[in-house]
Image (tube, grey):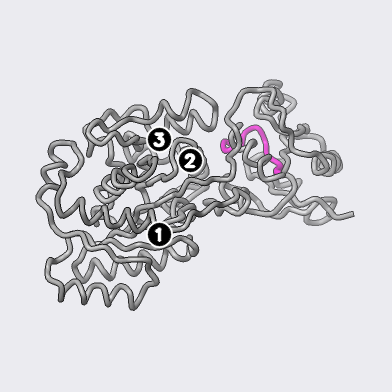
């Protein structure tokens, strides 16, 4: 009989290392992956997620998503902390085992739970698992300072004229939409994560409405310092569930993509990298100066490593007006990148005026150019992805 394959959630608890060593030396089950952050194990192939009650990523939403992928969850509780067992059961795990059960006890529990069909009866209230998503995720990114937030805002407005659209600020380095639109910073991405992960409120109630355009907006974090309070997998689950509110989700948040270590569990740009992985469409925004094109090419190389299947559009912001200069830029970009289109957005004083007033940009060259981008995205064939095939963040 085939040994069950395990995703083992890493915590400092002694049982984690003991179990890992025993399974490596003696078998009974095979550790497929050692999980530090929740996004990784959603994309791996395994039978059972083994996680202790102290693993901060273990939430009701995560358990539901694991079940939605046809896998089971074994919760490990501390017998000296009686509430820990009840906590795990409330999250909807398929079975529990004591942390001091010993190697043989763990193996028996893993083998037993591997044979369990993930349960559909949820005794405790919680969010539904992510269904196959019809909504298209459009991630707007590019080198920092290129003006991508303004492009994301106008793109969402333009898409909303064609279909239902939501704009989400998922930038944990420089969240800007609340300030840009002069809207309250609460509720925001953190509030939405609470609704999705723990069932505290409704996700729809976390969306603000921009009064001039009527577009629904999920505000970003109240400050960049709050980035340690969220994890990429949580952000992705919010994005997935926004698909119930709209057919297009425009996400602003993919700036720098360098894998910079910052905490023991993830890099500083982990959320941006996750948003690129999740994208159906990537909109890469760059400045038209020579150094801006160089930075664009470097950014797209990093993005392609993360999300190779996404359709790529390039927006050259603050582009020169002459056709000769634009032709040179077009040739430089298309000779180095496989793109669906290159959109040139020229200087428009209405952009600066709108930023001061906290309103969308008035009709003019800027909005017409972004409307062309929206038309190109809307013309793409529909893409339906099963959640089992979605890539998630590490």
Is residue 77 one of those drawn in magenta? no
Q: Can residue 103 be seen in this view?
A: no
Q: Which mark is residue 16?
A: none
Task: Identify the secondary structure beneath mark 2.
Answer: loop
Q: Would you place residue 88 above or below residue 113 in this image? A: above
Is residue 51 one of those drawn in magenta? yes
Task: Identify the secondary structure beneath mark 3.
Answer: helix
At 51% across and 54% down in the image, what residue appears?
A: 383
x and y percent of residue 359 in the render?
A: 19, 37
The quadrant in which the N terminus is found is: bottom right
Q: Which mark is residue 243?
A: 2
Q: How crowded is mark 2: few (under 14 residues within 10 Å), some or many (20 or more)?
A: many
In the rendered structure, the answer to whether residue 11 lies left or right of residue 321 reads right
* Residue for badge 3: 189
In the rendered structure, the answer to whether residue 64 lies left or right of residue 273 reads right
| Bounds of the magenta segment | 49-57
At 52% across and 51% down in the image, what residue appears?
A: 393
In the rendered structure, the answer to whether residue 292 lies left or right of residue 279 reads left
Residue 221 sits in which quadrant? top left
At 47% across and 57% down in the image, what residue appears?
A: 381
Task: Identify the secondary structure beneath mark 1.
Answer: loop
- As measured in the structure, the alpha-carbon distance from the residue carrying label 1 to the one carrying label 2 is 28 Å
- As measured in the structure, the alpha-carbon distance from the residue carrying label 3 to the one carrying label 1 is 23 Å
* Residue for badge 1: 258
Label whose residue precedes the other's in the sequence (2 or 3): 3
Label whose residue precedes the other's in the sequence (1 or 2): 2
């Amino acid at each position: 009989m085939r040994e069950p394959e395990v995703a083992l959630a890493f915590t400092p608890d002694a049982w984690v290392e003991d179990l890992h060593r025993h399974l490596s030396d003696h078998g009974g089950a095979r550790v497929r992956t050692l999980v530090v952050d929740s996004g990784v194990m959603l994309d791996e192939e395994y039978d059972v997620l083994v996680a202790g009650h102290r693993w901060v990523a273990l939430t009701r939403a995560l358990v539901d998503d694991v079940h939605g992928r046809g896998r089971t969850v074994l919760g490990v509780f501390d017998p000296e902390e009686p509430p820990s067992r009840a906590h795990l059961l409330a999250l909807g795990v398929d079975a529990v085992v004591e942390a001091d059960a010993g190697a043989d006890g763990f193996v028996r529990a893993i083998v037993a739970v591997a044979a369990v069909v993930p349960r559909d009866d949820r005794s405790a209230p919680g969010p539904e698992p992510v269904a196959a998503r019809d909504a298209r995720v459009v991630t707007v990114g590019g080198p920092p300072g290129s003006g991508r937030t303004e492009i994301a805002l106008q793109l969402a407005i333009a898409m909303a004229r064609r279909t239902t659209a939501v704009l989400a600020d998922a930038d944990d380095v420089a969240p800007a939409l609340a300030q840009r639109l002069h809207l309250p910073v609460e509720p925001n991405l953190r509030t939405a994560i609470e609704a999705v992960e723990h069932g505290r409120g409704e996700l729809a109630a976390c969306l603000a409405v921009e009064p001039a355009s009527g577009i629904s907006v999920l505000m970003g974090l109240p400050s960049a310092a709050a980035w340690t309070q969220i994890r990429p997998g949580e952000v992705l689950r919010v994005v997935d569930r926004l698909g119930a509110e709209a057919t297009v989700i425009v996400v602003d948040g993919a700036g720098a993509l360098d894998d910079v270590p910052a905490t023991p569990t993830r890099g500083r740009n982990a959320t941006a990298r996750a948003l690129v992985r999740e994208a159906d469409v990537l909109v890469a925004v760059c400045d038209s100066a020579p150094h801006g094109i160089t930075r664009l090419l470097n950014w797209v190389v990093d993005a392609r490593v993360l999300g190779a299947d996404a359709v790529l559009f390039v927006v050259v912001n603050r582009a020169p007006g002459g056709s000769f200069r634009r032709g040179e830029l077009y040739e430089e970009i298309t000779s180095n990148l496989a793109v669906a289109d290159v959109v040139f957005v020229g200087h428009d004083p209405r952009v600066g005026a709108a930023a001061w007033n906290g309103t969308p940009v008035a009709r003019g060259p800027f909005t017409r150019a972004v409307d062309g981008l929206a038309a190109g995205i809307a013309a793409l064939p529909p893409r339906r992805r099963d959640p089992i095939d979605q890539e998630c963040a590490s």
